[in-house]
Amino acid sequence: MPEIRVLDTEPDLIESSNLFRTAMVGLPAPPPYEPGQIRELLEPGRTLGAFVDGVMVGTADSATSGLILPGGRTVAHAAVTHVGVLPTHTRRGVLTALMRHQLRDARDRGEVVATLRASEATIYGRFGYGVASTSHTLELDVRRARLLPSVAGGGPVRLLEPGAVWNVLPRIVDEHPSARPGTIDRIPLWWRGRELMAQSGRGPNYVAVHGDPGSEDGFVRYRPIGTDRWFGGRDRTVVVDDFYAPTRAAYLGLLRFLLALDLVDILVFAAVPEDDPLPWLLTDRRAVRLRSADDETWLRILDVSAALDRRVFDGDAVVRVGVVDELLPENTGTYRIGATGSGRTDSAPQVEVEVATLAAALLGGTRWQQLDRAGLVRVHDDSALPQLERLFATAEAPFAGVMF
């Protein structure tokens, strides 16, 4: 078995970064790190290395964050990223050792859940992760896009100078946080990473903010692609990388701004919630099409009792759910789930699930009927499933909206 170590020296941290990119195959190499720069991007004590015969062959990283559960409460959250194993050492237990170590460490830190973005869909289910939210990529033909007369206007929008971007955007998020389930904190390490990416990126990037100076409540980051064919092109395309609009006014103001961009034929919204209202705002809803619907948040419940206690449930039903967690056996047990409170019980379960199945349902993004039809729910009481549907229902689809 590999030896798992916490990486703390700058050479080891840089080696882990390079190892991750080698494992991912298709990621571009970052520019050379300046002295001390790698430490601006990683939380001390959370980058792991897997060693075989003294050689680093795998790595995993995480960061302390928060995640919003249905009902608006925030729980301590481990943002997991940079998981990779060298192609020379795959299928030898390296990833398993890293994941087991990381899960136990996050649980011991008091974190309630962990989430990640999966490069492959077949890996993380065996570690208790379930798909808890979906991200849509939408393509809008600006030439056909007309807003309905009933659509309200937004507020003022202005472009930011590059030097102001990374001071203004964090303030907007801090002062106007999203309440959508699945939202995760944009921590300082995350912002610093976006800033460095923007500085090293090729081609133009733009940022526009909604609201009067000093009281902005939303922003959009966008960039053109195919600029070598821009002048005289027929399908000039702008990609919207980050559309942060927690208020209706911000959403509509920023959308109107994007629709009014000159020389743009196609807008691609790289990541929006599956219940995004865009098609309903247009006179011709076929001007927008779904390019892809992708799994977004892979969620792992680290502390089932705390997660259920902090989540708000709807209705007056009470259901007993048995949970099995082989990697964190302290989670295994039966839980009473209801709007008046949730907790452990010694009574017999009405349904039983693996912890990954409960994770998929936790944010309301996966329906219990779907899970049951997939054979992931062992039902002992037929009345329990429709009751769980009502308990776990949410007004908004869960969505994080950021990569990490």
Image (cartoon, rainbow, N blue to C red):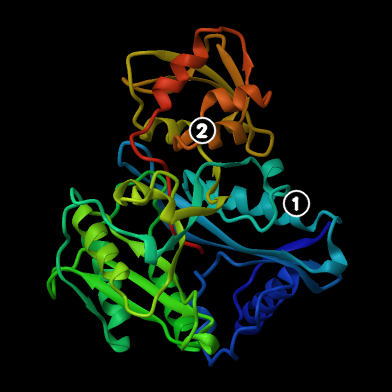
**The residue tagged with tag 2: helix, strand or loop?**
helix
23, 150: nearer the viewer: 150
Give the Cα distance between marks 1 and 2.
24 Å
88, 93: nearer the viewer: 88
149, 1: nearer the viewer: 149
State the mark number for residue 361: 2
Q: Please report the residue visible at 43 percent of the width from the left and 51 percent of the height from the top.
A: 286
State the mark number for residue 96: 1
Q: Check the image and report above or below for 125 versus 324.
A: below
Counting from the top left corner in percent of width and height, residue 239 is at 46, 71
Tags 1 and 2 touching, CB below 8 Å: no
Q: Check the image and report above or below for 322 versus 19.
A: above
Q: Check the image and report above or below for 157 versus 316.
A: below
Counting from the top left corner in percent of width and height, residue 130 is at 59, 40
Q: Please report the residue visible at 45 percent of the width from the left and 79 percent of the height from the top.
A: 224
Which of discs 1 and 2 lies nearer the camera? The answer is 2
